Image (spheres, rainbow, N blue to C red):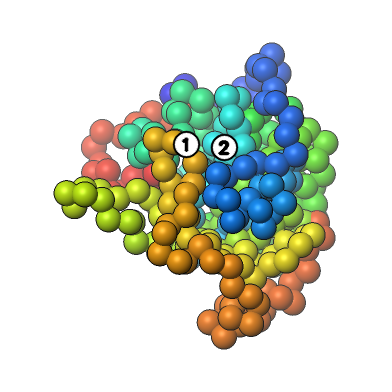
């Protein structure tokens, strides 16, 4: 990992230094490797777009973990920038190298920007999205995040479209609200498929498509991250099967969001905390 980027001025200098880095190869979609999910998204998540991932506070590991995996897939060999606030670090812990590697995130290609508050975080996100040499951007926001209103999200969306850099908004403990995001998701942890010898299973996630600007929503999948292959695979328990909007409404959690329209560094590792207390 490189040194921490803790101020907006330092982050701007670091972003400027990336201009000489090779830009990621342009592709219209970010493929996950999960056939059913990629097919439903017409080939994958749209590049140069903003995607929101919501997770309950108790599911922050799943929400941030899945967001970082997808951001890494979008970045390819280009740098990945993860922006968060100092408060997020105190609440969720510091990045942990082996945990990141288990998610397919190479710490050597990761830059973590720690901003003082949400206002600085969102300004830094817009600046970062204007750098076409950046592979992808992950922005961690906690709670209601009122500063991320429709105007702010449109600013992010315009910057992403202009540069082609894909942004992943990792919303921990927040509720969906009108935004310019291309897609909006709900994430929760899922049981890992059992392995021979009762060994630790692969990371698994329950993913629900809340909203999509162009296309069907209200669908569910269970994704299992195969770090050895660097892609998601189906869980094999039938949970990747797509469900319709009626089922989502019967399960709850879909009513209010259907009314919400869509418009539009690296810190050093901590050695004094157990791995379970560190963010993946």
Dot 1: element: loop
Nearest to viewer (mark 1 / mark 2): 1
User: Disc 2 on helix, strand or loop?
Assistant: helix
Task: Look at 65% across and 16% down and name the residue there.
Answer: 21
As drawn, the label of residue 126 is: none
Where 202 falls versus 2 (above or below)? below
Q: Tell me what residue is drawn at x 33 percent, y 56 percent.
A: 193
Quarter containing the N terminus: top left
- Residue lying furthest top: 20
Crowding at mark 2 (Cα within 10 Å: few <14, some 14-19, many 20+): many
Q: Can the viewer see residue 137 in this picture?
A: no
Q: Are marks 1 and 2 in contact (CB under 8 Å)?
A: yes
* Residue at 57% from the left image edge and 24% from the top image edge: 77
Q: Which mark is residue 230?
A: 1
Mark 1 nearby-residue class (10 Å; few <14, some 14–19, many ≥20): some
Q: Quadrant of residue 182?
A: bottom right
Which of these two is toward me, 274 or 118? 274
- In the rendered structure, the answer to whether residue 149 lies left or right of residue 170 reads right
Q: Nearer the viewer, residue 158 or 123?
A: 158
**Residue 26 appears in view:** yes
Give residue 229's position: percent from left, percent from top: 44, 36
Q: Position of residue 247 (x, y in %)?
A: 58, 81
Query: Residue 40: horizontal and vertical position, in percent?
Result: 67, 57
Q: Earlier in the sequence, mark 1 or mark 2?
A: 2
How far across and down, in percent of the image, does residue 231 sit?
49, 41
Name the residue at the bottom extreme: 250
Name the residue tied to disc 2. Answer: 73
Seen in the image, is 46 located left or right of residue 151? left
Q: Quadrant of residue 130?
A: top right
């Amino acid at each position: 990992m490189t040194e921490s980027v803790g101020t907006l001025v330092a982050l701007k200098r670091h972003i400027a230094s990336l201009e000489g880095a090779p830009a990621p190869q342009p592709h219209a979609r970010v493929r996950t490797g999960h056939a059913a999910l990629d097919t439903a998204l017409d080939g994958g998540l749209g590049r140069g777009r903003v995607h929101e991932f919501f997770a309950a506070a108790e599911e922050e590991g799943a929400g941030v973990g899945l967001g970082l995996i997808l951001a890494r897939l979008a970045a390819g060999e280009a740098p990945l920038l993860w922006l968060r606030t100092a408060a997020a670090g105190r609440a969720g812990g510091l990045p942990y190298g082996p945990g990141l590697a288990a998610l397919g995130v190479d710490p050597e290609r990761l830059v973590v920007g720690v901003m003082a508050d949400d206002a600085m975080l969102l300004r830094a996100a817009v600046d970062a999205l204007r750098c076409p040499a950046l592979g992808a951007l992950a922005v961690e926001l906690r709670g209601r995040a009122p500063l991320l209103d429709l105007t702010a999200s449109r600013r992010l969306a315009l910057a992403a479209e202009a540069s082609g850099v894909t942004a992943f908004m990792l919303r921990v403990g927040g509720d969906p609200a009108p935004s310019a995001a291309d897609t909006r998701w709900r994430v929760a942890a899922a049981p890992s498929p059992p392995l021979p010898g009762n060994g630790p299973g692969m990371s698994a996630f329950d993913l629900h498509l809340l909203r999509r600007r162009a296309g069907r929503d209200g669908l569910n999948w269970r994704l299992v991250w195969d770090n050895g292959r660097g892609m998601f695979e189906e869980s094999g328990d039938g949970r990747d099967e797509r469900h319709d909007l009626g089922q989502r409404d019967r399960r709850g959690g879909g009513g209010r969001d259907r009314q919400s329209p869509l418009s539009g560094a690296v810190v050093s590792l901590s050695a004094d905390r157990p791995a379970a207390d560190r963010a993946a």
